[in-house]
Amino acid sequence: MSFMLEKSFGLLFYLKQTPNYKKDQMYIYLRITVDGVSKEISTKRLWFVSKWNVRSGRAEGTNEEARSINNMLDTLQVKAHEAKRMLIDADQEISAQGIKNLMLGVDDRKMILEVFQEHNDQVAALVPQEYSAGTLDLFKRTLNHTRSFIQWKYRVDDLDIKKLNYEFISQYSFWLKSVRKCQHNSAMKYLTYFKKTVLLCVKYGWLKSDPFAGFNLNRKEVEKPYLTEDELKRIISKDFRSQRLSNVRDIFVFCCYTGLAYIDAKQLKSSELVKGFDGEQWIIKNRQKTESASRIPLLPAAQTILDKYKADPQCQAKDAVLPMLTNQKMNEYLKEIAERCDIDKLLTFHVARHTFATTVTLSNGVPMETVSKMLGHKNLRQTQHYAKIVDAKVAFDMKQLKDKLSLQG
């Protein structure tokens, strides 16, 4: 889209009285006016008031000094028109400030990666008070993806934010899916984080409109794996000779009965285990990912596991309630646990959290609003997906009943 060329444009050279004004001499200024908005530039040259032609905006006289002044003013006038042409050719807005900046060699453009980096630096300064380390990591990864995309598409190291439009977003989405091989939901996640920075540019007035307008950021629904009641029982009852597998199994089961994510279980401290208003033991803590509060009454199975590790030296040394390993190590051991228990699912701590939401709570009649609070969700929409899974289970169970009844008939 080209900016309107019919904007009013005017140049005026005039004498201006300044604090260091000399008798009968003033500095010559150039006033640039676009659509009624003016900016001025000092030529840093003095001239006599009595020898200045206000109508032509030039020095009067034929001597060498007058000719030198007028040649300089002619050159500045040509530069002003060249600056205007450069803005048109670059498809940038024609403004008095823009012309002045080009004439003075000032680049006040806002660049995409530069703005994004400044944003990320501010996020980093607010970890952990307002942002989690995980959120900062996502912003950093999104910045790296954006940098790679700009180099791939535009063959430059950075790009003026005024180049942000629907085409940029659409091509960025294509690049994430084709070149980076991201799944649809992952691509939408990165674009969502990129949008947070873009909207700041709109709010600051650096962008006239949101380039995401009309772009669909919706994610595809994916089935969240969880354990059935039978699979959970198999893991609980399995006798592991290995202490490491036994420990990882216990922690996984604890998360199945509390809904805690890996990082929240790792950071769980004894001070966050409190007696609730009902006299029972509760977990009350903020989720590391979202800082939203989780308030979870402890089920007997979870309490038993906590009691088991009360005197564990590793826990006591780290002021932790569970002997946690790294997420990567624990996921490796969970694969082994799944094989030993004949479970054909990739076990992760996400699976444990989903199991709490479905098999442990919703399937046993716990209301969705209650489950949402325990999971630390900020709204019910985040929890509704689990209800759909439970509906699928109900449908499956009822089909089995129908088949059984038809055989009896």
Image: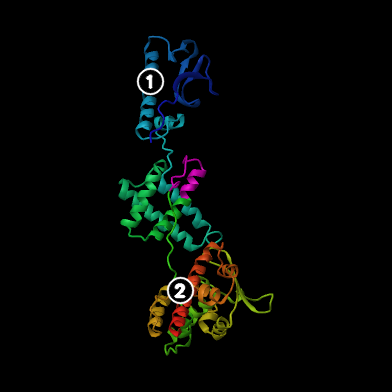
Which residue occupies the foreground of this view, 246 or 64? Answer: 246
Q: CA distance from mark 2 to mark 1?
A: 75 Å
Q: Say if 280 sits above or below 39 in the image.
A: below
The residue under label 1 is 72
Q: Say if 165 sits above or below 324 in the image.
A: above
Q: Residues within 10 Å of mark 1 (few under 14, many from 20)?
A: few
Q: Residues within 10 Å of mark 2 (few under 14, many from 20)?
A: many
Can residue 323 be seen from the camera position used here? no
- Name the residue located 48 percent from the left edge and 60 percent from the top edge: 135
Q: Which mark is residue 297?
A: none
Q: Which residues are magenta?
A: 197-214
Secondary structure that dominates the magenta span? loop
Q: Indicate the secondary structure of the residue bearing disc 1.
A: helix
- Name the residue located 50 percent from the left edge and 47 percent from the top edge: 200
Which residue occupies the foreground of this view, 314 or 402? Answer: 402
Return the disc, 2 or 1, that comes first in the chain's sequence. Answer: 1
The residue under label 2 is 351
Residue 60 in the image: x percent, y percent? 42, 10
